[in-house]
Image (spheres, grey):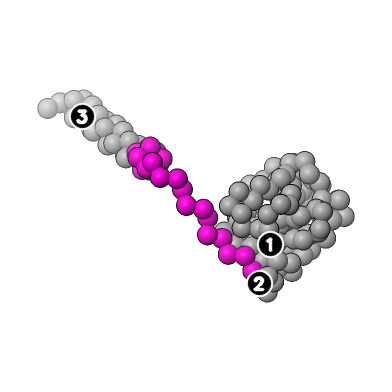
Amino acid sequence: MTPFRAAVTRVRRALAASALVTAVAAAALVAPATVSTRLAEPAGAAVYSSCTLSRCADARTARSGWSAKSFPTSRGWYSWSGGQCNFAGGQFYNREGQLPTNATYYEYDVYPRACNAARDAYRIVVNRSTGATWFSPDHYANFYRL
């Protein structure tokens, strides 16, 4: 076999391997949604009546900052102290019913950052009518009442 044919063969094998890996990854991502006819189970978030985590103080500080901005209801970036920005996520729909029902909630990021930067998992959820606030350090897997 000539060096050229050997190189072509290696490239074809590499492309075939890449296509196989892509197909397996795509099947892993899509298959559960197309195979399962069962409805997804509701998230099993735990809701705690108080917050004693180390980051609860940060969540309270964020709540104070958002309160000073009158808890905006529009989704978007808001200027924050220190030349940074923080993100208000708009309405939180409480679809899993983890928080008390018959209320309207809004979500806000806890930690400011550069405008348009990637967001992290730390949120506060506020009932603007009552002021009740929950901290979620893990993007709504658990809620801690502030």
Quadrant in which residue 51 is drawn: bottom right
Magenta part of the protein: which range? 26-48
| Residue 116 in sight from this viewpoint | yes
What distance separates the C-alpha of mark 3 from that of mark 2?
58 Å
Q: Which residue is mark 3?
A: 9
Q: Position of residue 142 (x, y in %)?
A: 59, 62
Query: Which amino acid type is shown beneath numbered disc 3?
Result: Thr
Three-letter amino acid code of the residue under disc 2: Leu
Q: Residue furthest bottom?
A: 52
- The N terminus appears in which quarter of the rendering? top left
How packed mark 1 is, by other alpha carbons closer than 10 Å (few <14, some 14-19, many 20 or more), is many
Mark 3 crowdedness (10 Å alpha carbons): few <14, some 14-19, many ≥20: few
Q: Position of residue 7 (x, y in %)?
A: 23, 29
- Separation (CA) of disc 2 from disc 1: 10 Å
Membership of 18 in magenta stretch: no
Left or right, 86 with reference to 3: right
SS at mark 3?
helix
Categorize mark 2 by other alpha carbons within 10 Å: few (<14), some (14-19), many (20+): few
Q: Secondary structure at mark 2?
A: loop
Q: Determine if residue 25 is in view.
A: no
Q: Along the horizontal axis of the image, is 29 left or right of 140?
A: left
Asked whether the residues under the numbered discs 2 and 1 touch, taking CB atoms below 8 Å apart as contact, a structural biologist would say yes
